[in-house]
Structures are given as C-alpha cells and as structure tokens.
Image (spheres, rainbow, N blue to C red):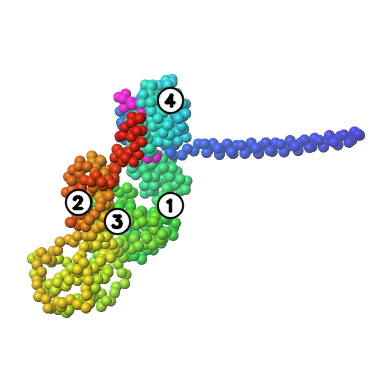
Amino acid sequence: MSTRRKEVLKKDNISLSTKIRGITEKFLFLRTFAHYVSDKNTLNMENYIVSARKYRPSTFESVVGQRALTTTLKNAIATGKLAHAYLFCGPRGVGKTTCARIFAKTINCMSPTEDGEACNQCESCTAFNEQRSYNIHELDAASNNSVDDIRQLVEQVRIPPQIGKYKVYIIDEVHMLSASAFNSFLKTLEEPPRHAIFILATTEKHKILPTILSRCQIYDFNRISVEDTVTHLAYVASKEGITAEPEALNVIALKADGGMRDALSIFDQVVSFTGGHITYQSVIENLNVLDYEYYFRLTDCFLENNVGNAMLLLDDVLGKGFDGSHFITGLASHLRDLLVSKDAATLPLLEVGTSIRERYQAQAQKCPLPFLYRAMKLCNDCDLSYRASKNKRLLIEITLIQVAQITAEGDDVSGGRSPKQVIKPIFTQPAAAQQPQAAPVASQPQAPVTPQLQATPPRPQAAPANAPATPAAAGTASSASHAAPEVVLMAQGKEEKKIPVVKMSGLGVSIKRPKVKEENKPTTVPTAQQIAQPEEDFMFNERDVNYYWQEYAGRMPKEQVAIATRMQNMRITLKDTTFEVLVDNEIVAKDFTAMIPELQNYLRSRLKNSKVTMTVRVSAPTEKVRAYGRVEKFQMMAQKNNALLQLKDEFGLELY
C-alpha cells in the first residue's frame, strides 16, 4: 500500500473517532440531565406525606376525640397498674392503633414527663421514633392469621426486652384470626411473662371469641364528633397554609362519618382539587354532595303546597346524576335537622356550620311540628320501599306530593299519628256531583234484600244512652235488624280477616213470601241496651285453634319448657267451640287442667269468640298416644321389636 493511501486512511480514522467521541459526550450529558430531573422529581415526591400520616398523634394529648380513654391509660401508667392484655375496639380511623403505639412508647420511656407523656429523648423513645425498636412488635392479623404465625409470636414472647421494661405486641385486625389460631393463643394471653403486654385492635368486636374477651381489658373507642373533626381540620389547614371555609370543613367532617383518617384523606383530595383554597361550593362539587339549598327550597315548596316546583327540583337533582335514594335520605335528614332546630334544648344535636345553622332556625319557625312528624314518616317509608320499587322515580314523586299536601287547607295535622298516604284530587268536582244522595224516607216500604257482597257498607253508630231516639232512627234500627248480613271485602284499604257468626235462619229470604211491611208492625223505640249490642263471636276452625295453641306455647317462659315442648308436639281436635287436649297420664293432665283458665282466655281473645272451651282427658289404654320424650319413643319402638330391650340390657345402656 502506498504512503499516500496510508495517510488518507489515518485522517479518516481520526475524524471518525472525533465524531464518535462527540456523540458519546452528548449522550452522557443528556443521560446525566435526565437523571438530575428524575432525582429532583423523586425527591419532591418522597418529601410529600399524606396528612393522615404526617399529623398522626404522637402523644396522648394530641389524640382527638378520645379524652376519656387517653386519661384512663395515662392514669394506669402513672400508678403502675398495667394489665397484661388490652382490647381496643371501635370504628375505623378513630385512633385505636395510634393509641396502642403511644401506650407502648410511654410505658418504655426512661424519663416520662410530669403529665404522663413520653419524653421523646431517651434511647427507648428515639428507637421507637426511628422505627428500630425491638420492644414493640406489630402483627397484621389479616395476613398472618394461621396457627404457625401465632406459634412464632408465642416463641418471641419468651425473650425479655433489651432496653426498657416491657415488650409490647400490637395485633391489628385481631378478629381475622382463625378459630384454631385463637385457641392456640389463649394460654399465652392468659398467663404471659411479666415483661409481655398484648394490645389487640379490631373494628368488629362481635367476631372475637368470648374466651379472648374475658382475658382483656376492653376499651371502646367512640366516633369522633363533627365539631372535633372540624377543629382538627382547621388546625391542619393552618399548618399547611391552606384557606378553608368552616362550612366546607363541616361537609368534609359529615362525609367522614366519625373517622379522622377518612376526614384527612378527603381533605387532601379537596386540596388537590382546589389548589389550596377550599370553599363550600368546591367541596360539594368534588365530593358529589347535595347542596343544602335544594332542601331549603324544597321545604318552602312543601309549606306552600306547591307540588309543581317540588317535582321540578327533583328533576334537577336527578339530572345532575344524584341517586334517588341519596336524595330521599338527605331530605329525611333535613327534616330531622329542622325538628331539632325548633327547640333550644335540642339545638346542640344540629351538626352544621354557623351560617347554615341560622337558616335552619329561621325555616324551623315556619314548620309546624305535626308537619315535620308526618313528613319524616313519609320519607322514611319511601326509603324503606325504595329498593323493592320498580319505578323508583314515581315512588319519590308520590312521596313529594303527599308531603306537599300535608299542610293543605282542611287537613288534620294532629301530631304523633301515622300519616294517611293518600293523594288529594287536584281538580275539584262540580257542586252538584259532590252532594250526597238523599236518604230514603223511613215511611216508604223497603224492598226485599238478597244476600250479596258489598264493599265498605255504612255501619249504624250506637246512640248515647241519654239521647232521645227519633222515629226515623227507630225505623232505621228496625230495618237494620231484619236486613240480611253482608260480608265486608275492603274497609279503608284493609281486608277483613274474620267473618262474624250469624244465624242460618236469617240468611235466606223467600221471594214467594216477602217480608211483612214495616208499617204493619208496631214501632218500638229501642233502648240504650238494645242499641249498644255486644260484640259478635267470630267463626273459627281447627286450624286456627292449633295455630294460636302453638303461638301460646312459643311464648311460655323457660321455666315451663317441658310443658311447652309437649304443647308444640300436640294436635288439637275441635268439636263445635270445644277443643280437647288428650294426654297420656294423670300428672300431665293436672298440669294442663291448671292452665285452663289462662289458656282458655288467651284463645278466646285471639279467636275473638267468647264460647271457646278447653277440656283435658287422659287417653284410654287402647288409644294411640303420640310419644313426646325419648323414653316414650324407645318404649314404643321396643313394643314392636323386643330385640331393642335385649340390646339395652346386653350393653348396659341408659336413656337420658
């Protein structure tokens, strides 16, 4: 190869190496810049902590809404009266695990303060705050609920603490442990070493075995009140430099339903939505909460009997995507708040902001108490029927119409009674159509009446004893006494369940032999005793007697369980109005004979017949008697098969 050719190749290699070096340097620069940006964003994300963790209480004094429990725990630590096992139970997010951690840190503190708090400066407190303490062990029972997990825990209990006095074992969601795990934990929980203290936390106390409950001191945590939640949220907002309206914080507290963790989570969500300026309007928009204004306007429509505007408000609410059940429950709560706003004594039950509280008080003065009682009842009935209804919107609209007509003119709004669920006619009828038909003149002869089914016939009312009877009334009473009986199908929307007993002779009316005209009979004025007729006896059958017989047996006290069991196994026979109780011996006959007055009166009242009679008879030897007990059943079986007696004697068996 020539020298010139070599020089050209050398120059090309140098230029290619320079280009590659330049490209490599640019790539390294871009990669370094990307790492820098990524590290900066990661650093910002790592620095952010949600409010529920950032403002988690670290002392008993900072725990919100559990003053009684924290005071009890502090006094127990100060006096040295510590139990070996505690059970913290209550709703979610009220401070059960937080109080368990504070309690564990405080009992191991080497130099506690005068008010019973941890110093946060000794080695034990520092190790706890830095999450490197070996004296405090937390176990999540939701994922570690087997027998092997509990066995490992029991083995760790034997090791004494390295620093401090106690080793504390916090078992969260303890109700998730299996039954076998509970049983393997019983002995250690009852007699642990002196240095071991167990703190069990759960939201479902009823799922824990009674043997576990009896070995623990039980602390019931309450739901945090709306006032305490609003105060704590305002404190967090001031720390974070966030402006918040009191009404907005009140809505967040109501949405949290007594849980501080939920309240802080909702608070963070609203802060992200509003950018640091929390208003009432932004909260109800972000949380999809119905505004109070809808309910205030709807109540005004009710008081004005304005059905049309009430229907339009409902359409507006449903058009914004709100559920009908949510709307009706909110309306019932609004009416309840109006009720408690009427009296100064119940005003503290109103958990709303100051400005809205004034509106409640102003509107409550316009609402009469009977209106509130009946409106709440109607809304509650609608809420109960909502799930089963196929046309849910129509159900709510009918309820709104009924509530709007409560205060209509002429309506009886006497308080305390269940409201009549009726809808009044919107269009009034002509005056001529509203007039009742004229009653027939008493002197005219009555046409023969044939037995027929009539719906809700008018019943004559009994006149007072001191009122003089008029001839017209006498004629009416006389005709009523000869009229054929009628079976009432419907009365005020309710079905009659019983048919009165009537004489068979009065049912048939011969067409060939019509009744004697009323004017041919002497008219007599009925006395007060004749007008106030006694109640009629109702018909019943053997099935009715057996039903109420079983009902009486089910209501008997535990002391009479033996005779109640006999009654449940009996089958009563009926002849006319007398029923017979057949027993197998004289002892049982005496027991039932002593019960005749009480049992007979009970059946008379339930069957609505004063002629019900009860008799008791001991069965004859030839009669077939039903076996009630185990011994009697065995004897009857042995009569059919003698081998049973031989088997009993061979093995020395006894019956219990």
Residue 115 percent across, percent down from the top left? 32, 28
Which residue type does callout 3 highlight? Lys
Q: Secondary structure at mark 1?
A: loop
Q: Earlier in the sequence, mark 4 or mark 3?
A: 4
Q: Earlier in the sequence, mark 1 or mark 2?
A: 1
Q: For this view, does 469 lie left or right of residue 363?
A: left
The residue indicated by pointer 1 is 288
Q: Residue at x 33, y 49 (%)?
A: 352
Whole-angstrom CA distance, mark 3 to mark 2, is 44 Å
Q: Earlier in the sequence, mark 1 or mark 3?
A: 1
Q: Taking 379 as reference, is 516 above or below it?
A: below
Q: Earlier in the sequence, mark 3 or mark 2?
A: 3
The residue indicated by pointer 3 is 377
Where are the magenta residues, as a range?
76-93
The residue indicated by pointer 4 is 154
Task: Report the mark closest to the observer, 1 or 3.
Answer: 3
Which residue type does callout 4 highlight? Val
Evaluate if marks 4 and 3 touch, with contact meaning CB atoms under 8 Å apart.
no
Q: Residues within 10 Å of mark 2 (few under 14, many from 20)?
A: many
Which residue type does callout 2 highlight? Met
The residue indicated by pointer 2 is 614
Q: Secondary structure at mark 3?
A: helix
